[in-house]
Image (spheres, rainbow, N blue to C red):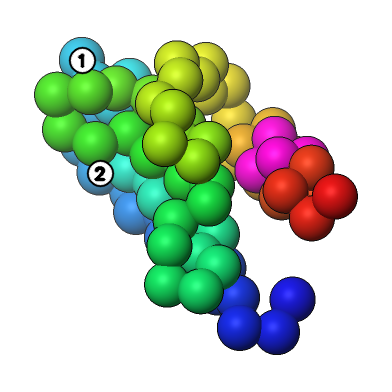
Amino acid sequence: MQGCTIEIKIWKVPVTKDRPFGLKYSLVFIREGKRVIGYDNAEGKGDHKHIGNKELSYIFTNVRKLFEDFYMDLEEAQK
């Protein structure tokens, strides 16, 4: 994956309506300067993911599942 970047950030934050698990997260896969895959729970948007130019709903259950789902999408993007 030369020329690619994977960035993973997870913060512990106060529990809110948008972040009921008390976590803020951002996982992104960038190829040639463009986001290919992204998972986040941006303020006001809740849990969602980006695949290419599409924004899709995402159901967060725990960090392990988040990593697994991100990795599965990453594997799919490599095909």
Could you say whether the residue bearing mark 1 is in a helix, strand or loop? loop
Residue 54 vertical placement versus 32 (above, below): above
Residue 28 vertical placement versus 53 (above, below): below
Residue type at tag 2 = Val
Which of the numbered marks, if any, corresponds to residue 13?
Answer: 2
Percent position of residue 3, x then y = 61, 83
Percent position of residue 41, x then y = 33, 34
Q: Which quadrant holds residue 65? A: top right
- 35 in the magenta segment: no
- Residue occupying image coordinates x 52% and y 16%: 59
Residue 15 vertical placement versus 27 (above, below): above
Q: Is residue 23 visible?
A: no
Percent position of residue 20, x then y = 33, 20
Residue 2 vertical placement versus 32 (above, below): below
Look at mark 1 in the image and give the residue it sits on: 17
Q: Is residue 77 visible?
A: yes
- Count up the numbered dots: 2
Q: Which quadrant holds residue 22? A: top left
Q: Is residue 40 left or right of residue 43?
A: right
- Range covered by the magenta-colored residues: 69-73
Quadrant in which the N terminus is drawn: bottom right
